Amino acid sequence: MLLTIFNGSPRGKQSNSRFLCDAFMKGYIEKDDGKDIIQIIDLIEVAKIKSLRSIFAQSDHVIIAFPLYIDSMPAQVKYFFETLKNYKMKKQIQSIGFFVQSGFPGKIHSTFIEQYLSNFSMRLGCQYMGTVIKGGGESIKISALQKKIIHRLIFKIAALTDLGRVGHLLDNKKHFNHFYELGKQYKKFHYFDSHIIKKLDRPKKINWFNYSLYKFIAENFYWNTLLKRYNSTQQRDNTPYS
Ligand SMILES: Cc1cc2nc3c(=O)[nH]c(=O)nc-3n(C[C@H](O)[C@H](O)[C@H](O)COP(=O)(O)O)c2cc1C
């Protein structure tokens, strides 16, 4: 049995989507019985997408992972889907599932695309395995960027206390472990464990206070750090197309 995971992030191997897929794969291959093959394919090269279609068609099961871009999917994922639409496959893909992770915390941002993905799977004639949603995806990079002990300590406390219902999003180890467990369960029972899905997709929605807290963390511990690193703070308010 061949399971192919397509990573639809334009950031390719350095993407949050890819890190989560890697954790899933780690869990999947933990107990290798020699019967199943799993591969992760990055969809970054649009020129190759048509040839990637044949990899899709050769797979028994498929998972497509991507970040939310402008409340939808990155362009190359859309293009990939469009090339699949009228593609006559020699054999039927048995099942298809999705990982969607958004920058904003809150499952609500991804629920519209979830409905589309379920319809899309039906149109392809595949069994729909569900969509695993994770909000606050960019926290993966925010947490990894913290070098100062005091900042790491603040993050640890925020994660442990689940500060403002968004603190848990800063706990990378926990989220990677959820995807690892998801991979293990998928290998054993061939479905996405609903308990793990519930742990990943919280909170469903956040209020104004919690959003402000998340924004404060993202701005001060991430965007500003990156701007300083690339010596670009002066240009932060530039509006090149205005
Ligand atoms: C062009 C662009 C558009 C985005 N649009 C959204 C959006 O509409 N909603 C959201 O929650 N996050 C949005 N994000 C944030 C990404 O979903 C988030 O940073 C994600 O973790 C990136 O994953 P990746 O590293 O796998 O590409 C956007 C990011 C970019 C670069």
Image (cartoon, rainbow, N blue to C red):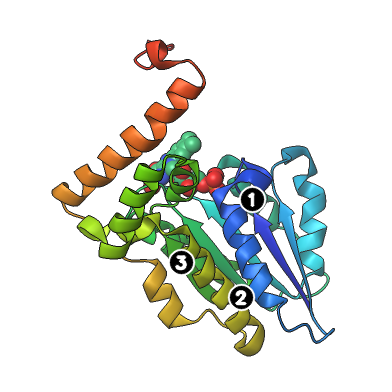
Q: Secondary structure at mark 2?
A: helix
Whole-number angstrom distance, CA of label 1 to CA of label 3: 35 Å
Residue pushed farthest front? 149
106 relative to 53 in the view: left or right: left
Task: Estimate the x, y position of residue 88 in percent, counting from the top left.
Answer: 78, 63
Report the amino acid beneath label 3.
Lys
Q: Position of residue 123 (x, y in %)?
A: 58, 67
Q: Which mark is residue 104?
A: none
Mark closer to the chain start, 2 or 1: 1
Can you tell which quarter of the image residue 24 is in? bottom right
Secondary structure at numbered mark 1: helix
Say which label, 2 or 3, has the lower sequence index.
Answer: 3
Q: Is residue 51 left or right of residue 224?
A: right
The residue singled out by tag 3 in the image is 174
Q: Amino acid at mark 1?
A: Glu
Identity of the residue drawn at 46% across and 66% down: 174
178 or 201, nearer to the observer: 178
Question: Residue at left 49%, top 45%?
Answer: 141
What residue would you read off at disc 2?
A: 183
Q: Residue at x 39, y 52 (%)?
A: 136
Question: Which corner quadrant of the image does residue 65 belong to?
Answer: bottom right
Q: Is residue 205 visible?
A: no
State the image coordinates of residue 92 (x, y, percent, origin top left).
Answer: 74, 75
Mark 1 burial class by Cα count in 10 Å: few <14, some 14-19, many 20+: few
Category of crowding for the residue at label 2, using alpha-carbon neighbours closer than 10 angstroms: few (below 14), some (14–19), many (at least 20):
many
Q: Which residue is mark 1?
A: 82
Going by the numbered disc 2, the residue's amino acid type is Gly
Neighbour tally class for label 3: few under 14, some 14-19, many 20 plus, Cα within 10 Å: some
